[in-house]
Image (cartoon, coloured by chain):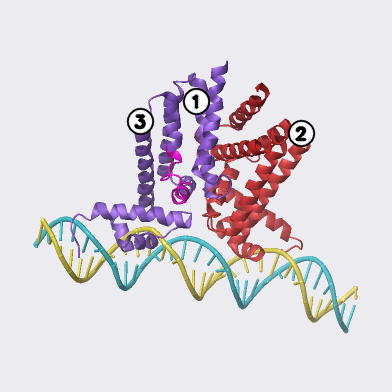
Chain colours: A purple, B red, C cyan, D yellow
Amino acid sequence: MPKVGMEPLRRKALIDATISAIGERGSLDVTMSEIAGRAGVSSALAHHYFGAKDELLLATMRYILAELTADTLRALGSASTPRERVSAVVAVNFSDIQFQPETIAAWLAFYVEAQKSSSLRRLLRVYARRLHSNLMSGLTGIMPRAEADRVAEATAAMIDGLYIRRALKDGVPDAATAIALVEDYLEIKLGERHKQ
Amino acid sequence: MPKVGMEPLRRKALIDATISAIGERGSLDVTMSEIAGRAGVSSALAHHYFGAKDELLLATMRYILAELTADTLRALGSASTPRERVSAVVAVNFSDIQFQPETIAAWLAFYVEAQKSSSLRRLLRVYARRLHSNLMSGLTGIMPRAEADRVAEATAAMIDGLYIRRALKDGVPDAATAIALVEDYLEIKLGERHKQ
DNA sequence: TTTTGTTGATTGACCCGTCAATAAAAAATA
DNA sequence: TATTTTTTATTGACGGGTCAATCAACAAAA
């Protein structure tokens, strides 16, 4: 019983289904039928709206990225000092929505797929650069640019590393502990400056 | 022209071929024929020696892990102080052999596959635990166990994170810079203790 | 009647794993 | 030593399965 105006709803449902499918299986090795089934439609419809599987995956990654961006901007909005900006960026990356096994598994899988797909690689590079510049937006108010650069790099690496370890379900268990580790690094890195 | 005693040679060649194939494609999505072709044999032979694809992949991961273990033990052997032990472990992870795009891509791909394969997951957990305990072997000589635990966790996360970023060919470019970032963290973390 | 939504069925490609067959070396037997 | 037999090495061909993508067809809204 076709109703008009289904396209946006179907697209959203298919993207959600893609995330949950990838999250559950832990890799991009999910079939179009599997995804479509979760969204309650036929695989033919998924192809109808997205053309090819690659494009569905790309759209999904874009969606995840957009979510992260929105969350980050929101968090940055309510931060008044440079120090708070840095903490806000860190906190967002470990927020309930972002630090879920499903989302993390998807991230990891996309990282791997990025080696094959140049459009995906470009997208991930945008994310990496944005994370860096978001961290910089706080750090440059605290330390010289050159040092801020290195601290941002180390912080970003630490965040990514904690993500991976979460995916393995080994090591750091919860978000709070992860945040504590990153904040501890930042604290001594920033405290260093006060003393001298 | 069959010669006797080929088995170990073929096994090694197939494992090498697996690493280079995975490294080049950037994912485990390599066919048995592709791997066998690189090793200069037929896909049937690969099956003959390894049974199934899973087992070849597992053997490959085991091989990479064994290499890393050997390198680490060698490095730890020539470290006399606890501080040197820590640096040795860090250095090994960024040594030329380990920090190559091919090897890194393989690591990343295996991380993803580990979500599906429990035997692979077990193997990676062994690696994570070993890295942790290797770091601890130095850190416990410098700070209380509880704090050493946290520093080891943060260091390990940073190492893993720098690996990922290397795979993306973005951010930290060379091993020296990566080592500098980790060492900087360790230095202030250790220096902190001197001052108080 | 044109547009939008939807699917079952099908096709074509790809790939894992198996098997029968071949050939040379090694071991056993005469 | 000469022969047969067994073991080891190796591959081409193929069966069976999976899956992305297509298409014709149908139904309801505009």
**Numbered label tally:** 3
Q: Was residue A102 drawn as part of the magenta stretch in this picture? A: yes
**Label 2 belongs to which residue?**
B79
Q: Position of residue B32 (x, y in %)?
A: 57, 59
Q: Say which amino acid is labelled 1.
A: Asp
Secondary-structure class at tag 1 = helix
- Quarter of the figure with residue C6: bottom left
As drawn, B66 above or below C30: above
Q: Position of residue B28 (x, y in %)?
A: 54, 53
Q: Position of residue A185 (x, y in %)?
A: 55, 30
Q: Position of residue B147 (x, y in %)?
A: 64, 36
Q: Say which amino acid is labelled 3.
A: Ser
Location of the N terminus of chain A (image quadrant) = bottom left
| Structural crowding at the residue carrying mark 2, measured as other residues with C-alpha within 10 Å and reported as few (<14), some (14–19) or many (≥20) | some
Give residue A43's mark. Answer: none
Q: CA distance from mark 1 to mark 2?
A: 32 Å
- Asked if one can make out residue B195 in the rendered structure from this viewpoint, the answer is yes
**Label 3 belongs to which residue?**
A78
Label 1 resides on the chain identified as A
- Residue farthest toward the top in the current orientation of the protein: A196
Check contact, mark 1 vs mark 2: CB within 8 A.
Answer: no
Secondary-structure class at tag 3 = loop
**Label 1 belongs to which residue?**
A149
